[in-house]
Image (tube, rainbow, N blue to C red):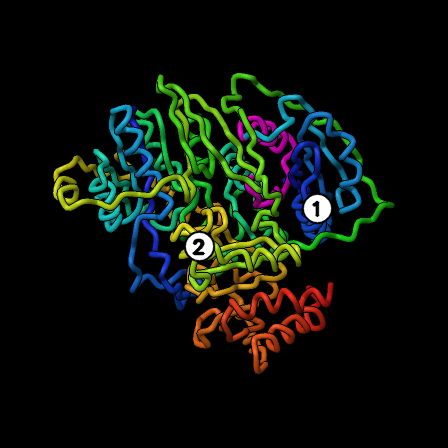
Amino acid sequence: MNIIVCLKQVPDTETQIKVGSDGQSIVTDDIKWVMNPYDEYGVEEALRIKEKFGGEVTIVGLGPKRVTESIRTALAMGADKGMLISDEALEGSDSLAVAKALAAAIKELDYDLLFSGQRGVDDDMGVVGANIAELLDIPQLSVIDKVEVAEDGKSVKVNRPIEGSTLVIESPLPVLITTQKGLNEPRYASLPGIMKAKKKPFDEKTLSDLGLDAAEFGEGARKVKVLEIKPPPAREAGKIVEGETPQEKAAELAKLLHDEVKII
Amino acid sequence: MAQGVWTIAEQRDGDIRKITYEIISEGRRLADALGQDVTVLLLGSNIKEKAAELGNYGADKVLVADDPRLEAYTTDAYASVISELVKADDPAILLLGASAEGKDLSARVSGKLGVGMAQDCTAFAVEDGNLVATRPIYAGKAYARVTFENSWPQMATARPKVMDINEPDTSRSAEVLDAAFSLDDGALKTKVVDVLKDESGKVDLTEADKIVSGGRGMKGPENYKILEDLADLIGATVGASRSAVDAGWRPHSDQVGQTGKVVSPGLYIACGISGAIQHLAGMSTSKVIVAINKDADAPIFQKADYGVVGDLFDVVPALTEEVKKYL
């Protein structure tokens, strides 16, 4: 069973996001870059399936050179091969363009199963996985928190939580699965794992290596144009509910919720 | 030239979901700004009787795709039918809800159409005849205003509970039309084999009007009972911070925040939650925020409309008693 995990590098979720002086970007100077948390679930699940069925796990990332570090982390966790699609022309690409580049790279590989995070915790779009699946003409299973590969390795049964219930869905392979928290507890890279990762195959591809036209990528080719990035609307400083005792405070709060905002 | 606003209706077990009214209402506002019509696309099986009332919320036309294979949502079938109909009619705007279904569907349809998409938007406007969407990024730590370029239809999803629903006008009904589409059985690869209902019957956090959420200050899973008592009384759903979920006190589906659910209730009561940036990001679009925490310096108080400095184990049960006086 050959499995591909798509990887994105994102700012650590602790990051305070600051808007750049151009009003169209964020300040990246002090950002700690990490593997997208949802992608970690994909790496872990791929490794578990490989441990049962054999085969190879390949990590495919896209972005600047710094993404190499996150791919190495996945290799240190136990993935077999890494690939980074890196090209200056990719800078500023939107979701559809990113999916095109990833799909072009994946087409050249041998795969039965693909994972990607249900969304990047930066742009919060959640579109790239589905667009890759469309470009590869395979089904998608979105926001999945349980995966069972059939014994014969030909199909998969997954749990997809939605509002008020969980759908159990079956699909033949190959299929692309986007991962949700709860799927597993990702392992940490061990020290021997980190040492081994340094010797694992790692490929770097440009757009022309993939036979793609640079004009279809980057800022200029965006179909979704950013007009402005701004800080969130400021919330007015609220009031501290007064009272001598917890009971008095609770009584005052209940009164405010009833009289002032009329929500209770 | 692309013309008209299309919205996709969402039904489950034949019942129209609330998000449908939210996006028809928003679609109506956008269509009025453009001087165009609103067409709602309704997919299902024996669903036609639900179509006309969508006019009450602002639909001019309802296009019904009725087929046994469309009874329950599957990505394969819905994305295929919708893409085909959109290509045939060439609308200017295509709106969906950013529900579980809408997010999955919109992502696939945008791929099929090869268009850009703005996911989970909190505001829309028409500027110079084009759709401009505002959407939180970094889970709300920043907001982006985006528009579309050489990308038709202009496609976006709206965050649940953010768009105001129009007062239904029963004198207004929509023209109901049958959609002509083809659906190739060979394209239907995935199959829903079971639906596990959430027995608690509680409203999902993303759709809840009120949320009572507990963090590390709850000290253990057994103490959530006091939050549940308050929640039951006021019709709220109980949520949790990441630290409470990571400690195993609550299921991951209860997590509010950057790596959990992003919520927009009318009332959010944060109990024993200090207000880590990941958590604040996930709930800052709540209309009214209440924080109950014994640490007066907790960052959550910076975001709260009403702050109670005190021990939640005293304040929450007292609040439950006080609220009863108003019910």
Quadrant where the image shows the C terminus of chain B: bottom right
Total of numbered circles in the picture? Answer: 2
Q: Quadrant of residue B63?
A: top right
Q: Which residues are magenta?
A: B75-100
Q: Is residue B158 above or below residue B196?
A: below
Q: Residue at x 67, y 29 (%)?
A: B44
- As rendered, which of B248 and B15 lies closer to the eye? B248
Q: Which residue is mark 2?
A: B258
Place of residue A75 in the rendered image (x, y in percent of width and height, measured from the top left):
21, 40
Place of residue B179 in the rendered image (x, y in percent of width and height, measured from the top left):
70, 27
Amino acid on which the number 1 mark rests in the picture: Tyr
| Mark 1 or mark 2, earlier in chain | 1
Q: What crowding class fits label 1: few (fewer than 14 Cα within 10 Å), some (14-19), or many (20 or more)?
A: many
Q: Is residue B10 above or below residue A237?
A: above
Q: Is residue B3 visible?
A: no
Left or right of B206 on screen, residue A170:
left
Place of residue B214 in the rendered image (x, y in percent of width and height, measured from the top left):
49, 59
Q: Residue at x 46, y 64 (%)?
A: B273
- As rendered, which of B179 and B73 lies closer to the eye? B73
Q: Which mark is residue B21?
A: 1
Q: Nearer the viewer, mark 1 or mark 2?
A: 2
Q: Quadrant of residue A178?
A: top left
Q: Which mark is residue A229?
A: none
- As rendered, which of B131 and B178 lies closer to the eye? B178
Q: Residue at x 42, y 55 (%)?
A: B242
- As rendered, which of B286 and A182 lies closer to the eye? A182
Amino acid on which the number 2 mark rests in the picture: Gln
Q: Is residue A249 above or below residue A224?
A: below
Element type at marker 1? Answer: helix
Q: Is residue A6 visible?
A: yes
Of all residues, the one furthest to the bottom in this rendering is: A244
Q: Quadrant of residue B278?
A: bottom left
